[in-house]
Structures are given as C-alpha cells and as structure tokens.
Image: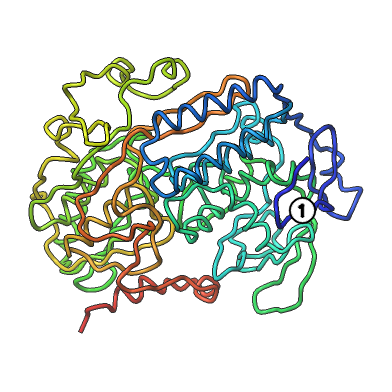
C-alpha cells in the first residue's frame, strides 16, 4: 500500500484486506461491530485499459485540459497514472491516482465519482467523521458532533496523532478546483455538495483507508488545554443528520432562496444555490416576487448574499442578473467545444438529454475557430450569447454582493459579470471559480468499465463577456471581510454587518 506525503505510515493497519486508520485504544464496541468493506482488485489489463480510455477521453473532449497547466505537465500526469497500473491495483488506489490526475487539471467540473458499490456501502456503514467542521484561519472548528462534549466552536487539533493541517494538505491533493484558488479547496474539504458530504470525508478512505475509530485531540472554546476523545465513525446518512449551519448539502433554488428587510431602506436577498434542475421553479417569477416585495417595503439598497452558492443552473443565475441589471447586456462571448464527434468514445459516455442531438449535431450549428475547435452559433443559444434586457421588476438601487470561497462555477460567472458591469460592490471572502468562464455547460460521465469509476469531463469552454479578470482564477472582492474564529464563536456575521453599514450615512 502506498501512502500520501504528510501522513505517516505508522498511522495505518491492515484489516480484512483493506487499510484501516486506527487510534490507540481497543475494546470499543463500535470497533467490534465494524462491518468491513472489501475493495475490489482490478487486474492489470483492465486497469490499463481504463487508464487509456480516460486519457483518450480527456484529450478528445476536455476543452480546458491545458488551460491552467502546460502540455508537458499534463503528459507527466498521464505517465504517473500509467505507472500506477503496471500491475493489479486496488479500486481505492486507482480512484486516488485518477483523482490526483484530475485535480492537476485545475477544473472544478473534472472529478471522479466513486464506484456505485462503495458509495452505497458508505451511506449505511460507518466511515465518516462524527462531526461537521468549518476551516477558519487555518483551524478545524467544530460545527456539530455526535458527542456533546465536543461542542460547537471546539477546535480539533489532531486526528489519530496527525495535525489536522497535515490531513488537509494530504487530502487537498485530490480536490478539483478552478485555477489557483487554494481557499476554494479548503472550503470544499469542509463541505462539498458534489461529493459525499465533504471533501475530507470523501477522500479519507482513499488516502488513509477505512477508519475503525477516530482519536481526536481537541480544545474547547477559550480553553488552551488539549484533551483527547475517541469516537467511532458514522455513516453518510448519519452525517447528513448532524446539525448544520448555513450551506445545505445539495440544496435547491426553490428551498434556499429567501428575502427580508434588515434595516430601514435596506433589503436582504439570500440565494444559497442556483441549482434549479432537481426541483425546478420559474426563476424569473421567483426573483420578480422578491424584488417587488422588497421595494414595496421601502428597499433602496439591496444586499445579495451568495456566500453559500457554488453555482448550478444558467436559468437561475441569468434570472437574478436580469433583476439586478440596469442596462442591456450580453452574458457570454462564446461557447467553444474541442470536438463534436467522439467516435467509439460515445459508447462509454453517460449524460442527460437527447443523445442524437449531443453526439450527431449538424456541423452547421457551429463555426470553426482558427485552432480547429467548434464555436456554437449565437443565434442557437439566445440565453447565454444573445443580448439580454433588464427584468421589468429589476432592482434599481445600490447593490452589495456578499462573496466567499464557496463561490464557483455559475455563481462566480454571475458575480464576475456584475462586477464588470459596475453594478455591485463585492464584500466578503475571495471567490473560487473562473471569472473569465469555466469549462462546463455539458458534463459527460466517462464510464471506465473495469473499475466502474465514472469520470466527469466537461465539454464546453464558456467565454464570459467580461473585460477584467484574474487569469489564475477566482475573484477578489472590493472589500475583504473574512470570517474569523471569534466571529463564529460569537455567532456574529461580520460581513453582513459591514455590508449593512457600507455606504449608509
């Protein structure tokens, strides 16, 4: 078994053919009742075939493969993956090595789904940390825990003898984020709706094996005395039931949008997600109602809280932008594809929508670029590429947008456009994502037959109609207000407080 830099080999033991992370105590009933999972071993021929299929799919389809990294760096990643499958390989190790390659690409939409058998096992069997946490100022701060002794605001300093900073560094190697945005990676390690609850919990088994117990070195709020607590892991379903604060796991626009007045003449609109495909609503009508009710209550200033919003559906992001714009605008300059025909790769691709339209679209729907790519004709995609008008109910007062490292994908696109239009003042933490546009739009799941691993490969490079952006990724707010541990302990929303004062005589 190989280990990851920063995690000591002495922290691992083997049990039932799988690596297990253990503490020092014995005799716990949770350990005795442990139900093991036996990772599959993929034979060398099957693993090598999976890797070559993945490499070919990335080269053929991915429009951002060398956007952030050089061709030599990507080829080096391919060779490291090939070296990992020269012989039979366990499904955990293969998943880990594939995830390392995908993280190298620096695209948040490029990631691997675990084999369905293991995902189902984790839902009912214990392998998650028995707590939720926030990563604040380089510290793991407890949001909730199965043991009331580890109260809200407690700090976990080490897990199974290793400092939490080591764990974050080691597990962070497998987190896919856009560009150079380490703040986004840390946020996803604490909570990620695309993974099994958090990046930390998601990747822990693949790096350290399945946990039998957790030995936590911790301190209570205001007490510098370090203590030790041994707790059994919990299932993913149990993790979902832990009390949370703020961001909901896989929220929907319909349920995670609310508004109110926070002071005279100042309205507040929280949009926790732009996801509008699991429980669809009329996004235009939703935001028209919000603006109408706030203006009827006298709102002349508006605080738009997007801090928990990682992106989602174009219709939701565009609807909100329509209700904040004062002038006609165009959202995107172009939508570019590396290929529109995929040969025998089509048989290994799962996706949504009309497969005939996706894989056999007439070439007349595209124009060829000088580098041989395909650009969608603007007249065929009016929502993103055609000029748009402000909504009839658009808010015409001062706008402040609250931002955070959670922002990525469609949320960052929308924030970038608002900033470029000079329509909003940004206040809060640094965003993730790509202000100049992510590789997304359509996501193909490439199914690797021998291992059962599915790899998400984006199809479209979205080019935003913005003049200024950071080519490294992310967005820096106009007013930087990062959440501190002290703010969290006191339940004080410093960013909202500053926004409520900002620009008020």
In the image, taking residue 274 as reference, residue 464 lies left or right, namely left
Location of residue 229 (image quadrant): bottom right
**Residue 43: x %, y % from top left:** 71, 21
Q: Residue at x 87, y 48 (%)?
A: 28
**Residue 302: x %, y % from top left:** 22, 65
Q: Quadrant of the N terminus?
A: top right
| Circle 1 SS class | strand
- The count of marks equals 1
Q: Residue at x 65, y 30 (%)?
A: 118
Location of residue 384 (image quadrant): top left
Above or below, comparing residue 206 to residue 442 in the picture: below
Location of residue 52 (image quadrant): top right
* Residue toward you, 410 or 173: 173
In the image, taking residue 88 as reference, residue 282 lies left or right, namely left
> Coloring scheme of the render?
rainbow
* Residue toward you, 35 or 297: 35
* Residue toward you, 125 or 291: 125
Above or below, comparing residue 165 to residue 285 in the picture: below
Dot 1: few (<14), some (14–19), or many (≥20) neighbours within 10 Å? Answer: many
**Residue 31: x %, y % from top left:** 84, 43
The single residue placed furthest to the right in the displayed view is 27
Q: Quadrant of the C terminus?
A: bottom left
**Residue 68: x %, y % from top left:** 41, 50
Above or below, comparing residue 484 to residue 133 in the picture: below
Tag 1 residue: 214
């Amino acid at each position: 078994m190989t280990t990851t830099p920063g995690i000591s080999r002495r922290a691992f033991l083997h049990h039932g053919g799988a690596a297990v992370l253990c503490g020092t105590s014995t005799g716990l009933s949770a350990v005795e009742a442990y139900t093991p999972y036996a990772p599959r071993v993929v034979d060398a021929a099957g693993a090598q075939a999976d890797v070559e299929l993945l490499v070919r799919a990335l080269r053929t389809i991915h429009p951002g493969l060398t956007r952030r990294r050089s061709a030599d760096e990507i080829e080096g990643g391919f060779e490291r993956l090939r070296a990992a499958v020269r012989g039979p390989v366990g499904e955990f190790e293969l998943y880990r090595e594939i995830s390392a390659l995908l993280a190298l690409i620096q695209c948040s939409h490029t990631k691997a789904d675990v084999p369905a058998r293991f995902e189902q096992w984790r839902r009912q069997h214990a392998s998650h940390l028995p707590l939720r946490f926030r990563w604040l100022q380089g510290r793991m701060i407890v949001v909730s825990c199965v043991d009331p002794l580890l109260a809200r605001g407690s700090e976990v300093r080490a897990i199974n003898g290793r400092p939490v900073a080591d764990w974050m560094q080691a597990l962070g190697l497998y987190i896919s984020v856009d560009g150079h945005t380490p703040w986004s990676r840390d946020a996803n390690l604490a909570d990620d709706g695309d993974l099994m609850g958090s990046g930390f919990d998601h990747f822990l088994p693949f790096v350290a094996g399945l946990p039998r117990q957790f030995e936590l070195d911790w301190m209570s709020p205001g007490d510098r005395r370090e203590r030790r607590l041994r707790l059994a892991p919990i299932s993913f379903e149990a993790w979902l039931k832990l009390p949370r604060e703020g961001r909901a796991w896989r929220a929907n626009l319909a349920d995670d949008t609310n508004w109110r007045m926070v002071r005279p003449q100042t309205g507040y609109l929280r949009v926790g997600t732009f996801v509008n495909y699991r429980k669809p609503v009329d996004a235009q009508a939703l935001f028209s109602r919000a603006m109408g009710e706030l203006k009827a209550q006298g709102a002349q200033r508006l605080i738009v809280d997007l801090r928990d919003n990682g992106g989602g559906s174009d219709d939701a992001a565009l609807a909100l932008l329509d209700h904040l714009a004062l002038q006609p605008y165009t959202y995107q300059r172009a939508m570019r594809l590396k290929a529109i025909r995929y040969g025998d790769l089509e048989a290994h691709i799962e996706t949504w929508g009309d497969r005939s339209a996706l894989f056999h679209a007439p070439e007349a729907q595209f124009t060829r670029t000088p580098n041989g790519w395909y650009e969608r004709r603007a007249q065929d995609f009016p929502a993103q590429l055609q000029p748009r008008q402000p909504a009839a109910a658009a808010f015409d007062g001062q706008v402040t947008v609250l931002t955070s490292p959670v922002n990525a994908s469609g949320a960052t696109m929308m924030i970038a456009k608002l900033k470029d239009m000079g329509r909003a003042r940004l206040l809060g933490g640094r965003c993730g994502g790509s202000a100049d546009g992510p590789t997304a739009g359509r996501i193909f799941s490439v199914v690797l037959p021998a291992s059962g691993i599915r790899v998400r490969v984006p199809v479209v490079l979205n080019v935003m109609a913005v003049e200024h952006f950071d080519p490294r990724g992310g967005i820096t707010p106009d007013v930087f207000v990062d959440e501190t541990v002290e703010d969290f302990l006191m339940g004080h929303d410093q960013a909202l407080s500053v926004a409520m004062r900002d620009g008020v005589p």
